[in-house]
Image: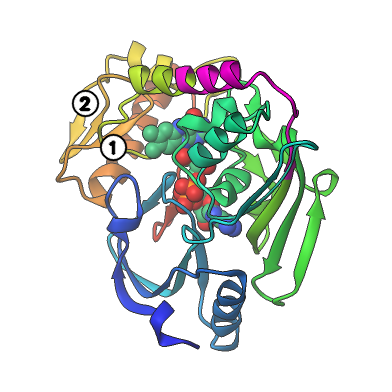
């Protein structure tokens, strides 16, 4: 494999939005599909564990040595839009804000909500990221993947993917998402779409701590309830462990006050869970994905 796209002992804190992470034994950022598939093949043939990450905006990585290969998709940015039909084909590393703004500028309706989610398309499909009742699952036609074990390339249609709240069947299989085909409503009012997209971003930045390192919502909302409200009602806003703090702006966010370790953040998650369980009898399930922890993801 080409050495240029492959480094050793890479500090993953530079690749997560909460700015903590361990050291990856091997790390690569493929720039095209061939490189992506070569890397998976290399890991497979060399019996190395292979983890795919996107923008690292929903990730807590332990500050330990992470054995095997970590592949970051952020350089896979191919995006093709057909304004007349509304068909969009995008590679896994396309950022949702880019997608959302490009859709609006092309008069395509249905992606305005995604502008404030700082993740990649691959990560968003894997997480079934969304807001309210909206998620990309609504607009998805199919997803192209590589099987990490067999290296087989497949196109999976929406009807064969199980999407639930912050869950997709990709969380329970071993497939690397390489690209997706989506459909958005064409011929929308350009001015209105751009305005709505702008306003959605404004609303997010006014109500969530975008100015500080975080990984978005820590916990999934329990049925008929809101994790943020539960944590807020318990007076936990501002509660800290080391450099990890429950945001004073939004109680379901943990922010890194510049010096937090992965351990501080993990402990804070555990303490919130214990306090909420003791006082309210509710188990808060983390939304954030964890690497290098003994945690059932
Ligand atoms: C300020 C802020 C606001 C946020 N707001 C929202 C919100 O409103 N709604 C929401 O749902 N989320 C939100 N998030 C969380 C996060 O942005 C989303 O979950 C996002 O979709 C994660 O994408 P990512 O590329 O960063 O994935 P990562 O964090 O890099 O990875 C997340 C998981 O996806 C897997 N994965 C990533 N790419 C691939 C791939 N190509 N193939 C297979 N598996 C892959 C990883 O292995 C990991 O398990 C927010 C985060 C932040 C920091």
Say which residue label 2 marks: 239
Q: Is residue 191 magenta?
A: yes
Residue 1: % across, % down: 50, 88
Residue 17 image offset from top left, x and y in percent: 34, 46
Q: Return the residue nearer the eye: 166 or 78.
A: 78
Q: Nearer the viewer, residue 83 or 45?
A: 83
Task: Please report whichever mark, 1 or 2, sits nearer to the chain's N-terminal start.
Answer: 2
Q: Which mark, by number, is residue 268?
A: 1
Residue 186, by quadrant, is top right
**Disc 1 and disc 2 in contact, CB within 8 angstroms:** yes
- Which residue is most to the top? 233
Task: Tell me if mark 1 has few (under 14), some (14-19) or many (20+) residues whose alpha carbon lies within 10 angstroms of its own.
Answer: many
Please, is residue 91 above or below residue 286 in the view?
Answer: below
Q: Residue at x 57, y 43 (%)?
A: 124
Q: Which residues are magenta?
A: 182-199
- Vertical comparison of 54 with 3: above or below: above
Q: Residue at x 29, y 19 (%)?
A: 249
* Vertical arrangement, residue 25 with respect to residue 76, above or below: below
Query: From the viewer's perspective, is residue 217 above or below residue 119?
Result: above
Other-residue count near label 2 (Cα within 10 Å), few / some / many at <14 / 14–19 / ≥20: some
**Identity of the residue drawn at 58% across and 80% down:** 38
Residue found at x 57% / y 72%: 36
Residue 217 in view (yes/no)? no
Q: Is residue 77 left or right of residue 250?
A: right
């Amino acid at each position: 494999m080409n050495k240029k796209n492959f480094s050793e002992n890479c500090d993953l804190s530079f690749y997560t939005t909460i700015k903590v992470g361990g050291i990856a034994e091997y790390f690569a950022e493929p720039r095209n599909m061939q490189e992506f598939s070569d890397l998976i093949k290399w890991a497979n043939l060399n019996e190395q564990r292979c983890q795919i990450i996107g923008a690292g905006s929903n990730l807590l990585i332990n500050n330990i040595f992470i054995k095997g290969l970590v592949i970051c998709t952020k350089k896979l940015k191919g995006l093709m839009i057909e304004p007349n039909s509304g068909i969009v084909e995008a590679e896994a590393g396309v950022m949702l804000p880019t997608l959302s703004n490009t859709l609006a500028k092309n008069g395509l309706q249905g992606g305005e909500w995604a502008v404030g989610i700082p993740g990649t398309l691959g990560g968003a499909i894997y997480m079934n990221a969304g807001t309210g009742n909206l998620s990309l699952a609504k607009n998805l036609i199919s997803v192209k993947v590589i099987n990490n074990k067999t290296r087989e390339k497949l196109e999976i249609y929406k009807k064969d993917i199980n999407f639930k709240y912050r869950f997709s069947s990709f969380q329970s299989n071993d497939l690397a998402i390489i690209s997706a085909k989506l459909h958005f409503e064409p011929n929308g009012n350009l001015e209105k779409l751009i305005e709505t997209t702008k306003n959605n971003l404004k609303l997010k930045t006014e109500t969530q701590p975008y100015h500080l390192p975080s990984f978005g919502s820590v916990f999934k909302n329990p049925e008929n309830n809101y994790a943020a409200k539960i944590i807020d009602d318990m007076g936990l806003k501002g509660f800290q462990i080391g450099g990890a703090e429950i945001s004073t702006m939004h109680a379901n966010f943990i922010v890194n006050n510049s010096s937090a370790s992965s351990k501080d953040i993990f402990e804070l998650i555990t303490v919130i869970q214990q306090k909420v369980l003791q006082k309210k009898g509710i188990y808060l399930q983390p939304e954030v994905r964890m690497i290098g922890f003994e945690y059932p993801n």
